[in-house]
Amino acid sequence: MPNPMRYLVVPSKETERWKEFLISNEWLERGYNVQKDDDERALPLSNSFPKILPPALSKFKIIEKVVSPPIPSNYLGFLKQKIGENTLNKYDQYWPHSFDQIGEIIIVKIDEHIEIYTNEIAQALLLQNNNSTRIFRDLGVQGDFRIRKLKLIGGSKELRGETKVKENGVEFIVDPTKGYYSPRLATERFETLECATILKNKLKRGLNICDAYAGFGPALMPLLNEKGLVNHILANDLNPEITQLLEKNLIENNKENVSINIKCEDAQTLILDVNNKGFYDLLLVNIPHSTLEHLPSLIELLNQGSSSLLRAWCIIESNKVKDVENQINDMFNTRKYVVSKLIVEPARSYSPTQIYTKIEVWLN
């Protein structure tokens, strides 16, 4: 049973005045509500309030009430309940203040200074986020596919890494233990839908679309969901761990029986298939650390006989935007493409000196 808490009883009309007085002396217990006491109000008192009433408050009475502790407003409040205020304050600079939430999964980075509290952090996050079923610790990017190494630190082991997400009006499955997915790029993917709609209206037909590094297919699902927008999709990803979920996602969202071809190969070899050359109206390239290196092998997938569009993303030094713009322009001019509009602009910061940058090239 909770311990009784002391309350100072004041006239209702003077509640705010005496509340401010208690705050100024650090005598008000934060997080607890003011209570009704007949026609008066009872203000919760902190442990630092004197045992004997100060002279300024001598005309008021003190009562005790048994009340439940307030529900914390963030995970640190739940963590405080588990480890105590002193420990929380001791490691204040190390507690994570942000995390990625993907469907029912939370991914959090934990500093080595507070590793011994990993279990408590996971439990606090689960208490704060009722819809989450698993907490993974982010141990950094590894391997050729630049996948985050994730360790389950809280929640159900049986569910593994798969989770359903909803983005831009469609639902699909991702597994961050097998491949990369970021909900932070949802806006970029919505812009792709807007651009595709403009291109479709310009061509007056459904689009042939290639996503060279499709992942779980988050950029393609909203396009499939738009009636009459898509004629054919080539979805490729080199990571075989992803291909099964990519196929499942595309099939489940293919309401109009659009023609879909799913590949698991190096995207730079797609051009070797003669049927791919010049076939695609919209080309998506999102392999940020290698986009500029891979683009020369991908450009000729784009239709040269009518309007077409490249949307790509790369990570570059923040002072190199103009250089990249010139580099992209030269790539297309060398291959006799007519560039009608070229956009190279920062989408968000990646590091103190680097930016995640959007590339948009409209042709003919």
Image (spheres, rainbow, N blue to C red):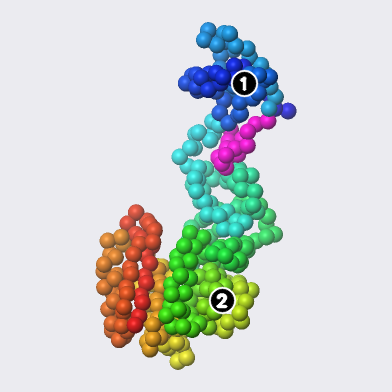
Question: Relative to the observer, which residue lies in front, 361 or 26?
Answer: 361
- Residue at horizontal 35 percent and vertical 75 percent from the top: 361
Which residue is disc 1 drawn over? 41
The foreground one among 202 and 225 is: 202
In the image, residue 35 sits, relative to residue 208, either above or below, namely above
Label 1, secondary structure: give it. strand
Q: Quadrant of the N terminus?
A: top right
Q: Residue at x 68, y 22 (%)?
A: 65
Residue 243 falls in image quadrant: bottom right
Q: Earlier in the sequence, mark 1 or mark 2?
A: 1
Q: How many marks overall?
A: 2
Q: Is residue 231 left or right of residue 309?
A: right
Alpha carbons under labels 1 and 2: distance apart: 60 Å
Magenta residues, as a range? 68-84
Q: Is residue 169 left or right of residue 360?
A: right
Instruction: Check the image and report above or below for 173 versus 207.
Output: above
| Residue 82 within the magenta-colored segment of the rendering | yes
Q: Position of residue 129 (x, y in %)?
A: 61, 48
Which residue lies most toward the right here?
Answer: 1
Looking at the image, the residue that sits furthest to the bottom is 274
- Residue hosting label 2: 227
